[in-house]
Amino acid sequence: MKLGMFMMPLHPPERDRTDCFEEDLDLVVRCDRLGYEEAWIGQHHTLDWEPIPSNDVFIANALPRTTTIKLGTGVSIMPLHHPANVATRLAYLDHLARGRFLVGFGQGGVPCDYELFDLDPAKVGLMTARGMDMVLRLWESTAPFDIEDEFWRVKVQNPRPDLSMGDILKPYQKPHPPIAMSIIKAESRGALTAGERGYIPISANLVTPAVLKRQWEVYCEGAAGTGRPEPDRGEWRVCRSVMVADTDADAWEFARGVYSRSYEYMIKILKAGMVQEAMKLDPRMTDDDIDVEYVLNNLCIVGSVDTVVHRLRDVIDVTGGFGQLLMIAQDSDNDERWWRCVELLATEVVPALSAG
């Protein structure tokens, strides 16, 4: 079992933004020193709780502060960007990282983000698929080229070889950085596509173990459908919201603060996105049954080291196992117990899981 981190991030709207960004960078640095394998950084434009609008800029800032941790876009929201800009910026980051870089692609899901960029929500799924394909084609193309789909056209038809003019920057890693896709629903098109293409699957945090199990099955179906070999579970990243402390009481006391408020927010966001079915342990549950107490007790993992290890082993048993646990980054709430949680996950929880 490996350990990584997924940073949306989650900060209360009233907190100073500059302080939030410094804390986020500090968290990545601490994770690097503790041996975390990866940190995936989110991106949104109109969410006060998740205030990083440019994850590539964040990664560029974090790279010189760290030494071994790999940094990934979690995700690059394709409909919000021109593919040529995405291709060149990500390739540049890959060089700055000397390969310590991962790429996540996705479509987002925030209505106000779509409105900000004047996007039709009904088209963003197709835009994402087309944008991903265009980025990949740009990374393998040399001028002259002319690539067009329903949404974009990129072309360089008059290169100047005498001036070394016409080709875009290609990634440091060949043929490109490892690519991931995020997955929320049980019958996820994203899981199928990731399996078809051999991309890294990243499963969301607030879904049930049974949904996780089905996501892996869909991923494997995608791989089989395109003749790929049976996928390696070691490549599967599973996000979980974990708060571990020295005692159950300490963990729960922390969880009753800003941590709890962040999940009140997440419940509203996921219901607005119509993905609440993935949160239900019992399909007979009503949407109103999904409240913060339900989420904290059933979908988050809160407690001492022994409690958390036991709960995570239950997830492993139901899913059949996965390669990397991605801890969800939380606001510290000006409480040292958060930083203790980050440490305990690396020094006690994951070693216990790895030991079987």
Image: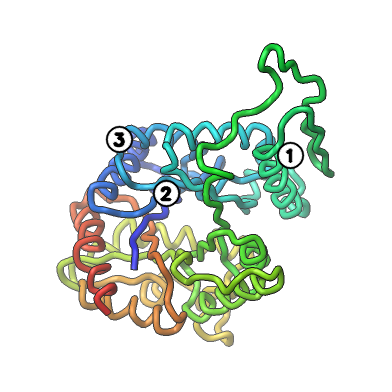
Report the residue at 28% width, 47% height from top.
Answer: 32
Residue 304 lies in quadrant: bottom left
Label whose residue precedes the other's in the sequence (2 or 3): 2
Label 2: element kind: loop
In the rendered image of this protein, does residue 78 appear above or below residue 226?
above
**Residue 24 picture quarter:** top left
Could you tell me residue 163's position as x and y percent?
68, 12
Q: Residues within 10 Å of mark 2 (few under 14, many from 20)?
A: many
What element does badge 3 sit on? helix
Q: Is residue 91 left or right of residue 333?
A: right
Which mark is nearer the camera, 2 or 3? Answer: 3
Amino acid tagged 2: Pro
Which residue is identified by label 1? Answer: 118
Q: Is residue 274 left or right of residue 309?
A: right
**Image quadrant in which the N terminus is located:** bottom left
Checking the image for residue 9, the label placed there is 2
Residue with the mark numbered 3: 65
